[in-house]
Amino acid sequence: MYDYIIIGAGVAGLTAAINLTRNNLKVLVLEKNSKPLKKLSVTGSGRCNFFNDDEDLKNYHSSSPSYISKYITRYNLYMYEKFRESIGICERIENGYHYPFDNFAVSVVNLILKECEMLDIKIICNKEVTKIKHDRYFTVNGYTSKNLLITTGSPAYYKESNTENLLDKLKIKYIDFKPSLCKIKIDESFKEISGLRVKASLKYESNGKIINESKGEVLFKENTLSGICSYDLASNYYKYEKDPYIIINFIYDKDKAELKKILEGRRKRLGLRNVSELFDSIINYKIVKYILNKINIEDKLWDDLNDDEKKKIYDTFTSFKVKVVGTDDFSGSQTVIGGIPIDKINSRTMEVKDGIYAAGEVIDLDGNCGGYNLTIAFITGLLVGGYNDQNI
């Protein structure tokens, strides 16, 4: 008889397994894949960004936003830090982003698995859950337990999750999963600037209103926007579907009045220059050429432009509007929106109902790029059953 059967050997599942075992509870972990922590091993392009110093709640999202603060608390963040120390993670911090010191995700994988080994936690791989029976106890594929923890992840990235089927079997209501942290598909051909990676500011507009914005690196592809900056806005497509647009500011944090001041100042200092020459070192020449072609302005001497043409340049370079037509699918997404509503979960123990618990991507709580989704996975794993900080 086990105290907990954990379905899913990802970050949330194994974090819960470690913490529960440290509290003298007997656990069994069942994993569908051939090895545990499969997704963690490749996260962050193999570097594993697992935390961010900017822990403002604006970096987290849910259909129940007022409940986010019950999970992302100062105490829970402190306990997450102590847990990382307890399993031996040595950290490197770069501009507030936390990585393993050697910059290899596999190091974090090895430390988690070593702790599981030291605690004699039983992990059975290649074990897809097909049968669950619940009367007085839970019987899962022939194993019996007092409690059940679901950490099966989501369809994101590997698209191998059977989470929806499992939740349906257990009669647990959930919000449909949709891709998040992925490429944004647009009705605009960026063929001429495809492959360029630049700093920019993006605003997401729906029904004529600005929903939110993100600043950072944007990678332009023929019909998509990629990079961290656009990833953080992708899920808005499913939340605000009416007349969706992305407004691109190619000058990053400068508005059109500031751009006007910059260009006019350069004209005075540098003398007679073509439009593209005034933009040298401000923005890539390919983008300048692309935009001038889009607004039908010749790359001629700045002094030969009329006021309307100059205004069009200021407006377009700081507010280039493209229609959003979709996002990448689950296989191209880093995480998802949707899952078990967090206002229906006990935020102190992660209990959903009747001895059934959930943690990680299966719950309706997600974050921006930058370590936030791993923070969610570790914290919610630690919360399962209520944790005892004397054992961390």
Image (cartoon, rainbow, N blue to C red):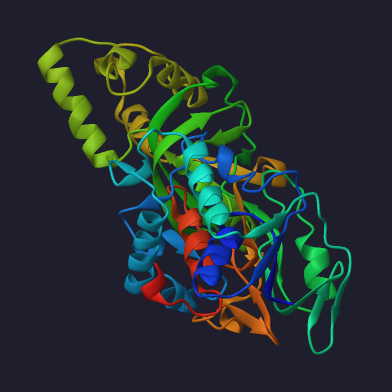
Q: Is residue 259 left or right of residue 248?
A: left
The quarter holding residue 129 reads bottom right
Q: Residue at 35% of width from left, 37% of height from top?
A: 101
- Give the vertical position of 277 relative to 328 (above or below): above
Residue name at image x 55 percent, y 79 percent: 385
User: How far from the left and from the top, in percent, is residue 381?
Assistant: 54, 66
Let me know if residue 154 appears in the view. Answer: no
Q: Quadrant of residue 236?
A: bottom right
| Closer to the camera in the image, 263 or 186 | 186
Q: Is residue 213 left or right of residue 323?
A: left
Q: Is residue 119 left or right of residue 264?
A: right
Q: Position of residue 306 (x, y in %)?
A: 31, 24
| Image quadrant containing the C terminus | bottom left
Provide residue 176's location: percent of width, then percent of height: 73, 65
Q: Nearer the viewer, residue 102 or 366?
A: 102
Q: Is residue 303 visible?
A: yes
Q: Residue at x 15, y 11 (%)?
A: 271
Is 276 in front, or is 57? 57
Quarter assignment of residue 185? top right
* Picture mark count: 0
Q: Is residue 161 above or below residue 184?
A: below
Q: Is residue 344 above or below residue 128?
A: below
Q: Position of residue 51 (x, y in %)?
A: 39, 52
Quadrant location of the N terminus? bottom right
